[in-house]
Structure formats: structure tokens, C-alpha cells
Amino acid sequence: MGKSYRIAVLPGDGTGPEVTAEAVKVLHAAAGKHGFSVETTEFDFGGERYLRTGEALPDSAAQDLRAFDALLLGAIGHPDVKPGILEKGILLRLRFELDQYINLRPVKLYPGVETPLKDKGPEDIDYVVVRENTGGLYTGIGGFTMKGTEHEVAVQSMVYNRKQVERCLRYAFDYTRKRNRKKTLALCGKTNVLTYVYDLWERAFHEIGEADYPDIAREYYHVDATCMWMVKNPEWFDVIVTGNMFGDIITDLGAITQGGMGIAAGGNINPEGVGMFEPIGGSAPKYTGKNVINPLAAICAAAMMLETLGETDAAKAIEASVMAVTPTMKSMGAGKMGFSTTEVGDKIAEGVAS
């Protein structure tokens, strides 16, 4: 047996435990086939714990999780907890404290999956968004004055320093080179309005590209144009790099073009530390316990995790199995797949092990 990986599993809320169970099932199948082992440890971070203890995360959480090779997250969101508490208290806190400064979002249409884009198929929708994940508007710099009065002022600032921008851009250039598809990196910004922040991004983009990545073609798109071309001509894109807010928006647009949240996976990555991999969709509490939720996004997140850990053959085997199963499914929607949650997981695991 080869290398052993310690994986922290955070099933979370709603249908999160159901989809992570299938992802773990597939992970073990891949490990058995490709000569490594996986040891999983569950953590109960989520809405139920918050309601029971009053804390979203214990102060020791980030340090405890650094002991693992990677984290696999199910979903965060509980109907009895006010929106924002768990998202900020768990997701954003872990991203910041573990310095997961890259959010990696493949946008890929699999065979047999329906897209709302007319006359587009798997050959047209296959690109990756690299989103800066720990800066910008999400750092919470700002506040209120005279709150609750007619003179109330609310401020939230988009703040980036050169180090944050440069490390994200270098990751994106390296990823484009490794992907070795069109070898084209596009910067998505808004230089005509956000003339300070995206001036920094654009200058760094061209300076770094010219000096260290002459083999990578560089393009620039305003964010509104990016959204337009993601719908009209997604085949133009190879890798897109952008800041936190724009990345949050365009990756959800990308998700619907690849078949919806049920199949969209993402990684929160610290290239020098521990990453957290997750399905993009929410906790879908109305489907909890019904065995009808689509586990493919969680399974694809597990594949991303293995690729990031260096188990590329196992990751490719999972994706190949997913691509063999998607044409047999009626839909990507919960309760409409033609199979149960566990049946989809079984099919993927069997394909990986064969």
C-alpha cells in the first residue's frame, strides 16, 4: 500500500451528510484501486452544533484541521439559524484562518447533462475559474454610522494588497500552464470603474505574465462582458482569474451552464497548506433524509481533492466514471435523477473500482 491520507470530513447540514457519504465511498474505491489509503475523521461543525452550543466553530478548529491532508465539506446552512451566521462563522472563517486563498472552480459540461445554452455541448463548456478567496469585499472592512436613521451610511471596502493579488495570479498562470489546453489566461475585472483595485490587478497580471509566463497568452474582459461571453461563447475560455466578489458571481453563472448546482464542485486551496473541497450547492434541507439529492458535485469535489494531493490517476478515474454515469441519468435535479443518492454513489464507485 502506498501513501496514506488523513481527510477531515465536515458533513454539515441538511443533505450534506448524504452527499459526503457517497463521496467518501468513492474515495475508498479510488484508494483501493490506485494503491493508497484514506483515513477519515468527522467533525460536527454546522447548524445543529451551533444551536446546541452557541458557537459556529471552536477556537481550536483551524489548528486541529491543519493536522489533516485535506478537508471534505458537505454543506452549510440550517433553516433555524439566521443566514450569514454559519457562512461567516464556518466557511469564511476557515478560508481566512487556513489561508485558502484560491477558490478553484472547473466549469465543465459532462455527457448527457442538459445545459440551458442553445447549441452548446461538452466540447464547448470546459474552462476553469480561479477566484481570489481571502481578500476584497469579503474581508468585512467597513461598517455603519447613524444606523437606523435617515442619515445612515453603510460602507464595505474592496481591499487588496500586491501580495494577495500576485500569489493568486501566479497560481492561475501555473494552473493554465499545467492544464495545457489553450494556454490562455483571462483576467476578469472592471478597470473602467474600479480604477484602483483592478488597476493593481491588471498591472500585476501583465508584469508577471510578461516576465515569467511568456508561453501563456493573456486576455482581459470586464466582468459584464465575461458574463455575456460565458453565455454566448463559453468555448472561448480556458482559465479565468478574478477577485473574490466577481468570482463568486461568475462561478454560479458557470454552474448553471454546466447543468446546475448538483454537479458543480469547488476547492478552497492553500497551495502551501490544507485545502477544503465542497459541492457548490447548498444544504437543501427539504430533501434531507429522502435519498434523492444529487451527490455528483460532492464526488467531483473528492476528485478535485485527490488531484490537488497529487493522486492524478485516481482523480481522472473518478471523473471518467462520472462521465460514464451522467448519460444514464434522467436529470441532475433532486428526485429527478432516475436513481437514488446511494445508487449514484454505488455506480460511480463501481466504475472507479473496475
Image (spheres, grey):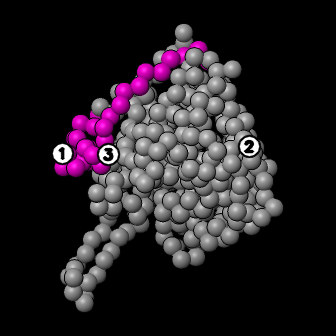
Foreground label between 2 and 1? 2
Q: Give the range drawn in magenta.
A: 34-63
Which badge, 3 or 1, comes first in the chain's sequence? 3
Of helix, strand and loop, which one carries label 1?
helix
Going by the numbered disc 2, the residue's amino acid type is Pro
Q: What residue is drawn where x is 40% and y is 64%?
A: 137
Residue that mark 3 sits on: 46
Q: Which of 221 and 202 is in front in this view?
A: 221
- Compared across the picture, whether 206 is left or right of 156 comes to right
- Cα distance in 3D space between marks 3 and 1: 11 Å
The image's mark for residue 53 is 1
Quadrant assignment for the C terminus: top right
- Cα distance in 3D space between marks 3 and 2: 34 Å
Of helix, strand and loop, which one carries label 3?
loop
Q: What residue is drawn where x is 70% and y is 62%?
A: 116
Residue that mark 2 sits on: 327
Q: Nearer the viewer, residue 15 or 155?
A: 15
